[in-house]
Image (cartoon, helix red, strand yellow):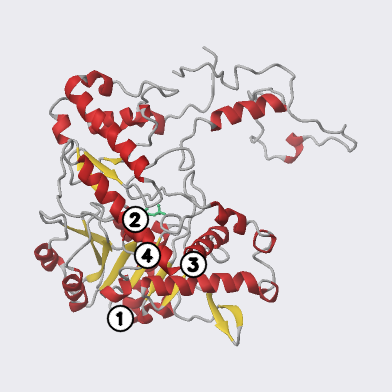
Amino acid sequence: MHKDNQPLIFEITKEGRVGYSLPELDVPEVDLSEILPVGMMREEEAQLPEVSELDLMRHYTALSNRNHGVDTGFYPLGSCTMKYNPKINESVARFPGFANIHPLQDESTVQGAMEMLYDLQQSLVEITGMDEVTLQPAAGAHGEWTALMMIRAFHESNGDTQRTKVIVPDSAHGTNPASATVAGFETITVKSNEDGLVDLEDLRRVVGPDTAALMLTNPNTLGLFEEHILELAEIIHGVGGKLYYDGANLNAVMSKARPGDMGFDCVHLNLHKTFTGPHGGGGPGSGPVGVKADLIPFLPSPVLVKEDNKYTFDYNRPLTIGRVKPFYGNFGINVRAYTYIRSMGPDGLKAVTEYAVLNANYMMRRLEAYYDLPYNRHCKHEFVLSGRRQKKLGVRTLDMAKRLLDFGYHPPTIYFPLNVEEGMMIEPTETESKETLDAFCEAMIQIAKEVEENPEIVQNAPHTTVINRLDETKAARKPVLRYTKS
Ligand SMILES: *Cc1c(COP(=O)(O)O)cnc(C)c1O
């Protein structure tokens, strides 16, 4: 299926060729079969490629050139905030004082690192309007779960054991209902109204004494700001529930509005989105959680505190939900986020939000004549188009996403949110220039024209990539783990 002539590493193998040189063995050789438990030894030789170090280097360098990343091209993957990660973050994360410390070192020897973490916490307290922040959770979904466990502990400490339900709007991020389920709650879905916002009537119908919390993604996955927040807060607090803010996409509101001021009791952030931690490849993330005062006793322990100008980890937290991450979160990614916040400053962070929102609205208005816009309102950091007009001509959103690859772009998020037919969720981010936004819009416009004039070219896309269209289900379920010469 691969179209260029880069051979597979199994095709350049030469028997006996090695990519290492070790000194001759000068100790007795160990017979593995005497050490390994019976049945653990492989019966046939592993079929490993045999190549030189240089061949290996060239092979992987060539493969790496096929990767698409933020540093190689535009990546408007909705909800994922694939923005530029400033390289100064990397330099600071490599400072020996940060990179070479060990998490088991005595606190007195890592006061500087702890001060940095503490300052980061305080910055996030300020940015979110919360009273305290934990940096332990390793990702957004982990932060959601951590916050829900605190909410559950809070209700239980009040003897409120009947609060078993978490309300999640249908425009929430998919991790919300998943986290609620993993935290042991029953998820109740509320619908969006025709403006794409939470339907308050529907919400009033489902709340009650069994409501533990409402999880609100804001802006929601349609890129729309939930306008009736104060009413919504009244409804939830009125029945004794807690309000949870999914702040993974804080770049839409940062320095303009704060969840804490809107009545929310807790919030999680994605430092690997808004705060420029690199993400992808399953790399380490960071999903800090901010809470209001009445949830503080339940924070994961230990809590990083400052006492008499010293930083220390406080383990004496009788009501804590316990530790949610070994040591204290993903340290390196927290260094990057701290560097970003300090290098941007308050005005810089405000500009981030303004440009993220301006860029998204600019693209939405450039494209609305060519694609259906299911919710015609100002958007925040992202917007959702529908390919239903193109579907009538026999071209699916998936086809158009594949066609974008021919133009060198990563496609947007597609078929999400679920309530939009043939959805395309586009998030340009603030770090892209107008020229890049225009070039992407031109490609989208050309594709819309191709759908009308020459649909096959879209239906059979991509044409210029190394491999053709994959059977995505098969690629996910049956990846080729072993090459056999045909
Ligand atoms: C990305 C995202 C999440 C999940 O974050 P992970 O770090 O991938 O677990 C949750 N909510 C929203 C709105 C998101 O965009």
| Circle 1 crowding by C-alpha within 10 Å: few under 14, some 14–19, many from 20 | few
Amino acid type of the residue that numbered disc 3 sits on in the rendered structure = Leu
Residue that label 3 marks: 135
Disc 2 crowd rating (10 Å Cα; few below 14, some 14-19, many 20+) is: many
Q: Residue furthest bottom?
A: 308
Secondary element at image label 4: helix
Label 4 – label 3 distance at C-alpha:
23 Å
Disc 4 versus disc 3: nearer the observer: 4
Measure how far apart labels 4 and 2 are at the Cα level. 9 Å
Q: Which mark is residue 350?
A: 4
For mark 2, what is the residue? Answer: 355
Task: Describe the element under mark 3 as helix, strand or loop.
Answer: loop
Distance Cα–Cα, label 1 vs label 3: 28 Å
Cβ(mark 3) to ligand 1 < 8 Å?
Answer: no
Residue 155's quadrant in the figure?
bottom left
In this rendering, the label closer to the viewer, 2 or 1: 2
Can you say whether 442 is above or below 468 in the image?
Answer: below
Give, as a three-letter code, the residue at label 1. Answer: Gly
**How far across and how far down the image is residue 397, in percent?**
24, 33
The answer to whether residue 145 is above or below residue 482 is below
Q: Residue furthest front?
A: 435
Q: Which circle's residue, 2 or 1, is located before the other in the chain?
A: 1
Q: Nearer the viewer, mark 4 or mark 1?
A: 4
